[in-house]
Image (cartoon, rainbow, N blue to C red):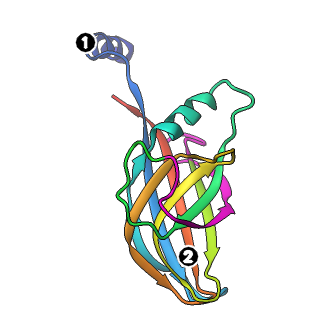
Amino acid sequence: MKKLLAYAYHWLMGPPQTGIKTRLVCEKRKRPGEPWEKVFEKHNILVKGGLAQFAALWGDAAAVPFTLGKIGIGTTGATVNDTQLANEVDEVTGTFTRFQTTHPNDSCRLVSLHTAPVGGWAITEYAAAAVGTPDTLWNRVVFAAVNLAEDEQLQFTYEHQVTEVV
């Protein structure tokens, strides 16, 4: 009976579609070893170049995954046409992990840690990117300035869940 109902549903509604849910969490701390303080949690804009790179990962053995966390001080609003941050100040190779939200390994996370230099920063933008010439952005997020004094740290945790949308 379940198969019959599923078949009838898909016949009426069409096959299920795949979607990507994203979430960016920004945390701050004064120095290593201290607890993280959550600054914000946001959704963001996926950019056209990032979506094309994502599609390439499906079958192009030479495609490069998104492993970089980039931060900047630009304030220009994010659009789907962005190819770089407005004013990048730091880029690090993040730590990548996969985990289960609904099904085994249906989600992944990229964590990047950025330490402010002498003079500090007022960070206003973030992107995950694939290494290249130029790098390929997956997304771009613009937010109210997060001020950091020298040696203070920002940690960005960017999560994706690939999910079935019925």
Identify the element where label 2 is drawn.
strand
**Quadrant in the rendering for residue 17:** top left
Q: Residue furthest right?
A: 62
Residue 40 vs residue 107: left or right?
left
Residue 27 vs residue 63: left or right?
left
Within 10 Å of disc 1 (Cα), the crowding (few <14, some 14-19, many 20+) is: few
Q: Is residue 150 magenta?
A: no
Q: Which mark is residue 12?
A: 1
| Magenta span of residues | 83-107
Looking at the picture, tell me which residue is in the foreground, 46 or 166: 46
- Give the vertical position of 58 relative to 104 (above or below): above
Residue at point 57%, 72% (across, down): 155
Quadrant of the image containing the C terminus = top left
The image shows residue 151 at horizontal and vertical percentages of 64, 87
Kind of residue at disc 1: Leu
Q: Which mark is residue 154?
A: 2
Mark pair 2, 1: CA separation: 48 Å
Residue at point 34%, 17% (across, down): 6
Q: Earlier in the sequence, mark 2 or mark 1?
A: 1
Identify the element where label 1 is drawn.
helix
